[in-house]
């Protein structure tokens, strides 16, 4: 079932050198019980007189969530209903801006779902009762009317079962649909387990004390991310780095960036997204656009192309809902989560359209040390290079030693300053229009933490690149390239002494795997000071 609070259920020994603690006691349940009590939790209570902690199973949730704080979600099962196309055609207003048209459609969908589509489970149970009644009559007397009625009811049931399967497949976040029998129960179970695993019910605060009250946990998360995305602990002056490190783009590359965007590029961008990718604040998944492109395609394309002409979009377009994904099996601190931004599909279409062009020039802008997100490069090449370097270091003989430093830039995406990003884009000599587009997309969004399925109060970040935006990895790699330039400057000035893998072979000073860095240098205190100086300047 999983558990919350202290990780151990048994302990022995009162002195530190003899102390032993393990998790020996567990609670197991089968799939039927998990589906019956979906909110059930297991808590490890404080140790009392026994060396085993009491276990407390709570079948029902402590608090009932507020439905008004849950975001709207477009249900893919609606697409299977015979009346959806008619509703869409009558509700979609192409004369409005696309966000306004989506808002109008959202209101109609809520009403339609309540009045006509209804709860799939209730519809299925009602239909099964009708089928049972008709089949009972057929046992007494078979008539053409009853047989026709039975056939129609069975067809309707098959459609409802398909809608139910799509509904739970969408909620399960599975990436595949197995063939053969319906997989509704499997998707249902997967969904319940996933939601239960992702639910956050207890964390430690900065002082190590456990927090269990839902609203206190919510405040802890909201305050942490407000601080993380603020500039409170940042020097207001951005250090000026050498702007000449990037290679000049060729005339052909600049023309490729500057040529007008086309409607075909917009459609390609939106269709390249996974159908069931999580929606942003507006609640519409890519599958809605894929299946409704004949109705909404012109409006969406016009909205995206208007952004490239006017350099602006309506307020709220680049807003995001932030979900917290655990980086460890049993997270105990708020830092054990990775914030993933769920952006609106409309906004992601804009940035994905830009990415399809930008990535063509990335190999020219980014040096060979970086392999991630660069077309034509593989991270495995850098892995092999590092392995060869380590092998060479072990074989080297002589008075000099060599060192390897592995650095993981903590919260690297979230700490990128927007003024530094703009300075980097200018140093890369991207066209002015591209710099304006990128800064418009990156800056000024409202962000809302999704805490156990409910939205918290929105806040406006002052820095950071959002993981979940298709553009962010490429912007981060551009910013990290400035660090590579500093390393190369230190080598050119004879301050940094890189390793040479063979006599007369190339020098190796650094290798990058997105936000992970591996640095090579002569093993000496002086070199450590040089490396530290480079990192501090960055």
Image: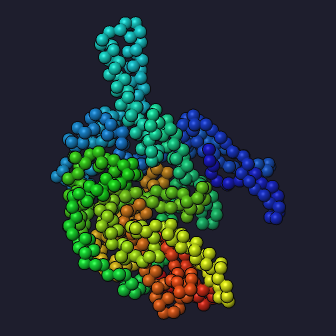
Residue 247, quarter of picture: bottom left
Q: Is residue 488 left or right of residue 52?
A: left
Asked whether 99 or 394 is in front, the reply is 394
The residue positioned 33% from the left and 39% from the top of the image is 78
Query: Which residue, as the protein is rendered here, is positioned at the far front?
Result: 503
Return the residue found at the far left.
95
> Which one is nearer the viewer's eye here, 218 or 441?
441
Q: How many marks?
A: 0
Quick check: 320 left or right of 19? left
Residue 263 falls in which quadrant of the image? bottom left
Measured as percent of width and height from the top left, residue 473 is found at: 41, 67
Q: Is residue 96 left or right of residue 69?
A: left
Q: Nearer the viewer, residue 36 or 408?
A: 408
Point 29% across, 62% down: residue: 353
Q: How is the image coloured?
A: rainbow
Q: Is residue 72 above or below residue 80?
A: below
Answer whether residue 342 is visible to the viewer in this image.
yes
Identify which residue is drawn at 53% across, 86% down: 504
Q: Position of residue 134 (x, y in %)?
A: 38, 15
Q: Is residue 342 above or below residue 371?
A: above
Q: Is residue 230 visible?
A: no
């Amino acid at each position: 079932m999983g558990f919350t609070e202290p990780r151990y259920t048994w302990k022995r020994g009162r002195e530190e050198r003899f102390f032993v603690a393990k998790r020996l006691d567990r609670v197991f349940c089968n799939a039927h019980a998990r589906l019956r009590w979906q909110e059930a939790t297991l808590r490890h209570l404080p140790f009392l007189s026994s060396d085993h902690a009491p276990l407390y199973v709570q079948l029902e949730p402590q608090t009932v969530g507020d439905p008004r704080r849950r975001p709207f979600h477009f249900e893919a099962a609606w697409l299977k209903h015979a009346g959806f196309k008619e509703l869409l055609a009558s509700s979609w207003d192409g004369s409005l801006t696309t966000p306004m048209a989506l808002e109008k459609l959202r209101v109609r969908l809520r009403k339609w779902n309540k009045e006509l589509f209804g709860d799939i489970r209730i519809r299925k149970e009602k239909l099964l009762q009708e089928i049972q009644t008709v089949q009972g009559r057929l046992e007494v007397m078979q008539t053409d009317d009853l047989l026709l009625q039975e056939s129609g009811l069975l067809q309707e049931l098959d459609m409802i079962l398909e809608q139910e399967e799509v509904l739970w497949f969408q909620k399960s976040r599975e990436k595949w649909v197995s063939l053969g029998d319906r997989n509704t129960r499997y998707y249902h179970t997967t969904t319940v387990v996933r939601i239960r695993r992702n639910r956050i019910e207890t964390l430690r605060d900065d002082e190590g004390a456990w927090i269990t009250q839902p609203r206190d946990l919510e405040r802890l998360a909201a305050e942490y991310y407000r601080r993380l995305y603020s500039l409170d602990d940042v020097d207001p002056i951005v250090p000026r780095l050498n702007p000449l490190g990037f290679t000049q783009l060729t005339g052909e590359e600049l023309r490729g960036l500057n040529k007008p965007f086309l409607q075909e590029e917009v459609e390609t961008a939106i269709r390249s997204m996974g159908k069931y990718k999580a929606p942003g604040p507006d609640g519409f998944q890519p599958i809605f656009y894929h299946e409704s492109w004949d109705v909404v395609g012109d409006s969406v394309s016009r909205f995206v192309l208007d952004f490239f002409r006017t350099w602006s979009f309506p307020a709220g377009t680049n807003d995001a809902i932030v979900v917290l994904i655990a980086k460890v099996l049993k997270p105990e601190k708020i830092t054990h989560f990775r914030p993933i931004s769920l952006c609106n599909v409309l906004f992601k279409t804009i940035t994905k359209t830009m990415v399809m062009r930008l990535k063509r020039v990335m190999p020219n802008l980014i040096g060979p040390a970086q392999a991630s997100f660069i077309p034509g490069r593989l991270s495995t090449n850098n892995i092999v290079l590092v392995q060869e370097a380590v092998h060479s270091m072990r074989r080297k003989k002589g008075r000099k030693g060599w060192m390897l430093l592995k650095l993981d830039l903590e919260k690297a995406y979230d700490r990128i300053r927007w003024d530094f990003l703009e300075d980097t884009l200018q140093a890369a000599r991207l066209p002015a229009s591209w710099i304006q587009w990128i800064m418009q997309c990156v800056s000024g969004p409202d962000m809302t933490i999704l805490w156990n399925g409910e939205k918290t109060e929105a806040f406006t970040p002052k820095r950071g690149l959002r993981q979940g935006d298709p553009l962010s990895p490429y912007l981060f790699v551009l910013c990290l390239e400035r660090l590579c330039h500093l390393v190369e400057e230190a080598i050119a000035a004879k301050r940094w002494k890189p390793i040479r893998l063979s006599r007369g072979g190339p020098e190796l000073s650094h290798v990058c795997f997105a936000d992970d860095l591996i640095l090579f240098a002569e093993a000496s205190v002086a070199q450590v000071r040089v490396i530290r100086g480079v990192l501090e300047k960055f």
